[in-house]
Image (cartoon, rainbow, N blue to C red):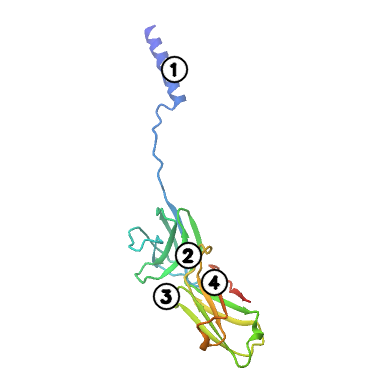
Amino acid sequence: MRNIKIITVAFFIALLCLNSDCNKVEETPVFNGYVLEGRLVNSCTDNTPLKNKTFEFRGENDQIGKEIIKGKTDSNGYFSVLSNLKVKYLIMEDGFGLGKTILYKIPGGQSINFGNVAYNFTMGLRLIYKNYKSILATDSLFINAQGVNPTNPYKSSYVKGPLTSEDLGVIYLKETPMYLNKDSTQGFIYLYKNILNATSPIFKKNYLVSTNCSSIQELIIE
């Protein structure tokens, strides 16, 4: 009779443990990081994949390189790395020590699929000058597009007057595109009546680099 009581009590204790998770061990949440993936291609007009290309992600303000996520593309240019860098912005750079920035202003703390990333990014700027009739036969228009890429910081061109169209054509700049291209100035467009008056531009406009390789950015000059 005593054994039956013991068995009954043990049964009810076991049943209570099941209902109250007696055997459950409290685990500390593990930070598994964020996935950064995409495909590295040659340029905006050439989708040839960059095979076995090393690269790295680091914090935007980490100039010493204390925290770096290294990666390498496969035979199709595809890459996927796990980042645990807890920073506001990331930069993607060449991994061969060339100091070449591929993308910057990448939001930290989230997984991102970049799609195709152009290693040699070139942007086109079509300039529309609404006041083109003000340029006479005795004038020449000097255009200076100043970017932030130290390897190719600006592009200059001359247009001899008089102007018969507001379309000044397309100029191309080698720039490092911002992945998050807002609330930040990427470069400048200056227009001068002539080169002799280059200290006093008749027009100045800030612009942002678009990360969209398929489009030419149009800037209206009024």
Q: Are marks 3 and 1 in contact (CB under 8 Å)?
A: no
**In this picture, residue 213 sits left or right of residue 55:** right
Left or right of residue 132, residue 19 in this image: left
Residue type at mark 4: give it.
Asn
Q: Position of residue 172 (x, y in %)?
A: 53, 79
Q: Residue 76, percent across and down?
A: 46, 66
Q: Nearer the viewer, mark 1 or mark 4?
A: 4
Image quarter of the N terminus: top left
Circle 3 sits in a helix, a strand or a loop, which is it?
loop
Residue at mark 3 to residue at mark 2: CA–CA distance: 25 Å
- Tell me the element at label 1: helix
Amino acid type, mark 1: Phe
First reached walking from the N terminus: tag 4 or tag 3: 3
- Disc 2 marks a residue whose amino acid type is Arg
The disc label shown at residue 12, or none: 1
| Residue 4 location, quadrant | top left
How far is the residue under mark 2 from the one under mark 4?
Answer: 30 Å
The residue wearing badge 3 is: 150
Q: Decide which of tag 1 and tag 2 comes sooner along the chain.
A: 1
Q: Nearer the viewer, residue 82 or 220?
A: 220
